[in-house]
Amino acid sequence: MRKATIKRKTTEVDIQGEFNIDGQGETKIDTGFGPLDHLLTVFTFHGLFDLQLQAQGDLQHHIIEDIGIAMGKALKVALGQMEGIKRYGCFTAVMDKVSVEAAIDISGRPSLHGEMPKAPVGSVVADKTFDDTNFTFKHAEEFLEAFVQHGGVSLVYNIKSGQGDLHHLLEALFKAMGKALDEATQIDPRRKGVPSTKGIID
């Protein structure tokens, strides 16, 4: 199985767990933030990964960002030499009135880019919180930025429709990301070696 330990301990945070690419969607997550627990659960469930994760620290910003760092590093370790992977994945998830597409390239050249129409999506994202918590769209992007940077992943998301609340928008995004990453990490039996004309992904 392709799996790796999640471990990051600094003066600000203590994060530990395990990430398994070839899992069954099983989770045991306690980050101290209900919205992040929920988003990581739907990401893991729909991506058919297994994730055990415990985190504590001083500030919400530190914990969210450092979880992204730790999970990104674990993904990179679990992928190993990346021989035979499909590398690319794309999926559109629908959640009530929300539609979000996520496209992934495990390229070794990390980047995060999002597209959204100004209305009505802008009103859903701007200054809105996840249910009755203080978790915002910016917090989710902080996690995603850290995850792609340390996982060597290029992630582009496109919020096609956002006529709902922030909860549904973020849930659709993390579901789409899970499905896209599942596709990108799948082994293609026809592929011999690393899926790059350079012969390496680093």
Image (cartoon, grey):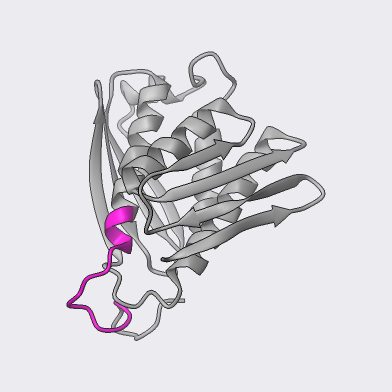
Residue 188 at what x, y percent from top left?
22, 71
- Residue farthest to the bottom? 199
Q: Between residue 120 and residue 179, name the one nearer to us.
A: 179
Residue 192, quarter of the rendered image: bottom left
Instruction: Magenta stretch: give its range.
Output: 182-195
Whether 79 is among the magenta residues is no
Residue 115 seen in this snapshot: no
Q: At x 34% / y 85%, what residue is drawn?
A: 198
* Residue 200 vertical placement versus 128 (above, below): below
Residue 17 visible at all: yes
Of residues 153 and 3, the one drawn nearer to the viewer in this rendering: 3
Choose top left, top right, bottom left or bottom right for residue 56.
top right
Q: Nearer the viewer, residue 199 or 26?
A: 26
User: Please, which residue is most extreme toward the top here?
Assistant: 132
Answer whether residue 183 is magenta in the image: yes
Q: Position of residue 65 (x, y in %)?
A: 61, 45
Residue 40 spot, x, y in % from top left? 47, 39
Residue found at x 74% / y 53%: 9
* 107 left or right, relative to 140: left
Q: Quadrant of the N terminus?
A: bottom left
Vertical placement of residue 16 versus 125, above or below: below
In the displayed orientation, state which residue is furthest to the right: 11
Residue sitting at 26 percent across and 67 percent down?
86
Image coordinates of residue 53 in percent, x first then y, are: 58, 45
Q: Main secondary structure of the magenta part?
A: loop
Up the image or down, 24 lies above or below 132; here it is below
Considering depth in this image, is 82 or 140 the residue closer to the camera?
A: 82
